[in-house]
Image (cartoon, coloured by chain):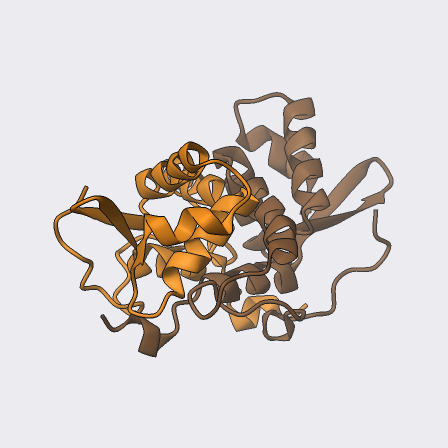
Chain colours: A orange, B brown
Amino acid sequence: MSKQRPVLTGTEATGCCSPLAEQPIAAADAADLAAAFKALGDPTRLQLVSLIASHAGGEVCVCDLTPRFAVSGPTISHHLKVLRQAGLIDCERRGTWVYYWAVPAMLTRLAGLLQVPQPAAVR
Amino acid sequence: MSKQRPVLTGTEATGCCSPLAEQPIAAADAADLAAAFKALGDPTRLQLVSLIASHAGGEVCVCDLTPRFAVSGPTISHHLKVLRQAGLIDCERRGTWVYYWAVPAMLTRLAGLLQVPQPAAVR
């Protein structure tokens, strides 16, 4: 678990990559980024990311997340681990509970990848 | 297969949804959109979308796609089917070959979902 909360905002996304529709993505980047999309490719995980990212104050106690789902606590923990390994969220333990926050740079990186450049979009 | 090429540009994305980081995504929307992210959650499929979306002229013959990958033609066909079912690409048969193009509205919809609203990004 990280001991530091992210300081990046959505405008400070890290390096790679150009939009998918601008130039073909390199194989190495595709392997890296497909893992992040795969993490989002589950309805519960997508809801978790959204609950965490949209939460007032920017972070959520796991104790506030699990009651919102019909699945078990360990299942939620597994989903949170997948999202953390994909770099979409991070967390910190404080006493009994673990607190989660979204990593805006990663969300912005993926959003940039999916953007459709305007000149290319005109058919 | 669709008989019509898309006329939407990237700025004309369809309805739902607010950015994940703006408000919690509804369960029904999460199920729908997770399927699209899952389709992108494979390195070969991510490369295929990028090759198709960035191709000069906006469409690609399947005959130009398969030679670019080490995997078999049927495997590429399977990946293309998954992407089409997710609404990310569409296609049309012309004679011997099938031609593929990206669906910019879907890419834009997913990009919008991942955008980080600026006020919420400042921690």
Q: Is residue B51 visible?
A: no
Q: Is residue B118 left or right of residue B15?
A: left
Q: Residue at x 42, y 37 (%)?
A: A73
User: Residue A108 at x, y = what percent?
Assistant: 37, 61
Q: Say which residue appears at 57% left-offset and 47% top-offset.
A: B34
- Residue B14 in the image: above or below residue B43: below
Q: Position of residue A78 (x, y in %)?
A: 40, 34
Observer-nearest of A73 and A123: A73
Picture quadrant of residue B61: top right
Residue furthest left in the image? A3
Q: Is residue B101 left or right of residue A18?
A: right
Residue A118 position (above or below residue A16): below
Q: Position of residue A94 (x, y in %)?
A: 16, 49
In the image, taking residue A109 as reference, residue B16 lies left or right, namely right
Please tell me whether residue B24 is drawn above or below residue A85 in the rendered image.
below
> Residue A72's x, y, as percent?
48, 35
Q: Quadrant of residue A30?
A: top left
Q: How many marks?
A: 0
Image quadrant for the C terminus of chain B? bottom left
Report whether residue B12 is seen.
yes
Is B123 or B46 nearer to us in this picture? B123
Direction bottom: furthest residue: B119
Q: Nearer the viewer, residue A27 or B117?
A: B117
Residue occupying image coordinates x 52% and y 34%: B44
Residue beneath the point at 87% across and 40% down: B95
The picture quadrant where one finds residue B7 is bottom right
Q: Is A46 in front, or is A73?
A: A73
